[in-house]
Amino acid sequence: MRRIPEEKIMSGCAISGILDRKGRRFSGEEIIKSIALMHDRSNGLGGGFAAYGIYPEYKEQYAIHMFYDDLQAKEEVEDFLERHFMISLAEEIPTRKVKAITNSPLIWRYFVLPDQHKLEQANLSEDDYVARCVFKINDQYRGAFVVSSGKNMGVFKGVGYPEDIGEFYQLEQYEAYLWTAHGRFPTNTPGWWGGAHPFTLLDWSIVHNGEISSYGANKRYIEMFGYKCTMMTDTEVITYLFDLLLRKHKLPLELVVKAVAAPLWSEIDRMGEKEKKIASGIRAVYGSTLLNGPFSIILGHKNGFVALNDRIKLRPLVCAEDGERLYVASEESAIREICPEPEKVWAPRGGEPVIGLLEGSSEEWL
Amino acid sequence: MALSYKNPEFLIERDYDKCINCRVCERQCANEAHYYDEDLDKMMAIDKNCVNCHRCVTLCPTDALRIRKYPLEFKENYNWTGEMINNIYKQAETGGVLLTGMGNPTKKKIYWDHLLLNASQVTNPSIDPLREPMELKTFLGRKPERLEFDQEGNITNLPPQIELETPIMFSAMSFGSISLNACKSLARAASEMGIMYNTGEGGLHQELYQYGANTIVQVASGRFGVHQEYLDAGAAIEIKIGQGAKPGIGGHLPGEKVGEEVSRTRMIPKGTDALSPAPHHDIYSIEDLRQLIYALKEATDYEKPVSVKISAVHNVAAIASGIATAGADIIAIDGYRGGTGAAPTMIRDNVGIPIELALAAVDSRLREEGLRNQVSLVIGGSIRNSADIVKAIALGADAVYIGSAALIALGCHMCQKCYTGKCNWGIATQRPDLVKRLNPEIGTERLKNLIRGWSHEIKEMLGGMGINAIESLRGNRLMLRGIDLNEKELEILGIKHAGE
Amino acid sequence: MKKVYAREEYCLGCKLCEVYCVTSHSESKDVVKAHKMEEITPRVIVESTGEVSFALQCRHCDDAPCTKACITGALQKDPETGIVGYNQEKCVGCWTCIMTCPYGAIKRDEYGRSIISKCDLCIETGEPVCVVNCPNNALVFIDLAEKQGEGVEEQDKLVKEQGGCRD
């Protein structure tokens, strides 16, 4: 971790995700195997996993995963957490020694609920309160970084190849119904643990392959709504855009996709009158949220995931279905590695979202 | 008065080996700089009449003409330049205000030329606009912070927008300051290219109502030609507070330009001077502006966006923020290099600030205040090429106005003598024999070609950046780097220096 | 047939059509030499008074009066092309054609020879040079009949749309 880069990080990557739509939990071994197959798509400068459903015993509490540079940073943040939250459990996240993983920060997790008095004072929803605290720690506490902050989920990431990171965090010990993974290939070498994917806010997590050429426009837009982009990564800004559109503006997922991977005007021209009005209205108002440039992303959430390509499909993305399992990855081989004969395999078109929903949860995500 | 001390500005050189005495130059010069001498059987020139508009040079069938800067040097002096001295001679003879036309030509920093654009290499692909879609469509108008939908899923809260096929519009140029044929060329080109032109404070000539869907009708301090039908005709309404070439002062169309048609269109008596007051006499403060904005919205049933045009002055950011909260849907900012049909030289060359800095400051301020989404930002004031447009949009503009560039496409040669009414290119004139020199069919094609060419170039530059929609460039200052700029300039522009 | 039509509202009165007409009908085909070394009368006539001006040339009338008036047969209408042609060799300079032409489109040689000057639609080069070189598209070379159906009224309308005057 050490330093937050001052310029935008560019990177290429591998991504993978597995969802059990029945909500049955399974260990991290499969996802590690899948992402490990795409070893060559990353360069050892970042790997990470998001896991949903791993903390059933604390599922009503926010699980705050933290990186600290040193004990001083830890003390300061813990002081902040104590002032703003009721902490049920604070513990070091168990890791094992792995040769390839060095210079790890102090890695802790906290299960917390907002301090009721402070929450009432702030006049915010619980989620907004937590989000604000996350921004504050990342922005103002040197040497500290919030890795994840959702309920019943957690992110495990660091500098190294993803399979080494998985081993480091002992992910075979965890059980989740949704796993996403990321292997990173940055073109500069910040060696910063916080810069690895997934990136998260509350329940959202994003793994992302690509570079968003619209980053500057997206960043300046999202900052108008009180978000602080401090990480200088595309992934951070994508996370915030989804948070704004889905959680704050309460747009249905289908319209959010029409904003971030907007249909081309030539397609809009062919739409029916009503659809056309909606699509062009979205583009007129949310033009600054358009993610432009090559990307494939998996947006994880407690209710499932959305996998999405840029609208002209400049990055690979393959999906597969087998029973209750839904797979998505940068390469088909990464799916076949863990599910050799899926019932169905397909490559979604640019801008066409693949939505995997947990059974029983509605399209209304929130 | 006795002897004039003024020296000619230009020297007309004629190659007599080539001159065939066809007298085209003589017939084409409204300034009467050429004549045929029967005794000598030779074409002759009166240098002091020449304004260097190139009309004779362009039409000469044998390329026999050359115009040079008059080779008369004053004793070298950085302070008292020939221009300064000649200006004093002029004023000592007339006691008048120095008048000029077009934009500020002085040697001050042009920030566009200190901005550099980015392009993709390796980590993300550039996009080839010849093979992939490349979208320039732009909407101008107030955007809600978030869209709302009714039960059926229809959008319920989107205010009126104007839709541009490419983020370029023709700036306000009135019928009166320019000829009807120039207006027709602009109107037709705008309508055929899916963009907008702007009436300026000249009213709307009857023949131009058919282009209403591509017209921004202006309401300025003189309120010339403003009536219900006029407001209804346009796609948007613009309140003109100021103009980059002459911030803080009004306009003056001399009576000799107010012929039959101009008189009818402006609704003023023929032959009378059309004087636009310096301020709107019903706007002495921001709350008055709000009233006018809403009066115009009421008058047009809230069906058209209302724009407010100001010139870029020192505290432009605060003013723009006030205009946004006053209810404007579009803010148009005109920089200090913006053109004009006539302005006092001292004002044109010394009042106002560069549009690049004004734009950056306004965009940043509106974002800080969370207002940027609510208004569209249009800038003008010497956009010279497509790269200027790309830079303007990256700094934060939604679209640009082009005035001088459009006139140059029509044939303007920047002689800056628009105020004389003797434009040899048929643009800034009302003299019927000169007006007919601009064939609107040709004018329309030339303007369309310019817009087409620039749009192609914008697409190439976007593609190079790995972007395929103009909205992803808007305010994307990471696509810009500065060169030869100091810390303060970089800070205001919100960009890094090249190499950073 | 294709004819040259003038659009008065765009005519600059610059007379470049005359310059190019002379050049095109010269031996040298060089604009300077044609004017300085040869004696050629332009076959197009620019009429101008004040701000009104237009270029006039032979209308190549269907029922051309000049061909009937010509005493030597120097003026003949080509039944194929419709062009009213002029044979300088046969001309005796009686000027009867000039008196009969309803448009005043025929003029005497400016250098005192017993010949006339009239438009030949640049049969040699194909496209009339006056049209090609008009700086303001004030001359057009079109076939009205081809442009639309028959009917005098429609033709009139079309010519008017084109801004020209009907022959």
Image (spheres, helix red, strand yellow):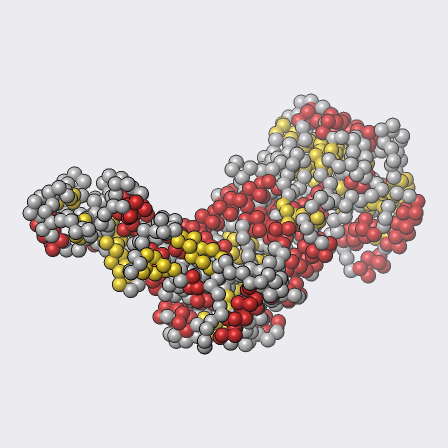
Residue B420 spot, x, y in % from top left: 44, 67
Does any portion of residue A347 appear in the rendered image? yes
Does residue B57 appear left or right of residue B331 in this picture? left
Residue that lies at the very extreme toward the top in this rendered image: A340
Q: Is residue A20 above or below residue B98?
A: above
Does residue C156 appear left or right of residue B42 in this picture? left
Residue A14 spot, x, y in % from top left: 71, 32
Residue B404 spot, x, y in % from top left: 50, 57
Residue A242 spot, x, y in % from top left: 68, 46
Q: Is residue B323 above or below residue B478?
A: below
| Quarter of the image where the N terminus of chain C is located | top left
Q: Nearer the viewer, residue A254 or A361?
A: A254
Residue that lies at the very extreme toward the left in this rendered image: C71
Q: Nearer the viewer, residue A118 or A230?
A: A230
Q: Residue at left 23%, top 54%?
A: C45
Quarter of the view holding residue B434: bottom left
Q: Residue at left 38%, top 60%?
A: B45
Quarter of the view holding residue A355: top right
Q: Residue at left 51%, top 76%?
A: B95
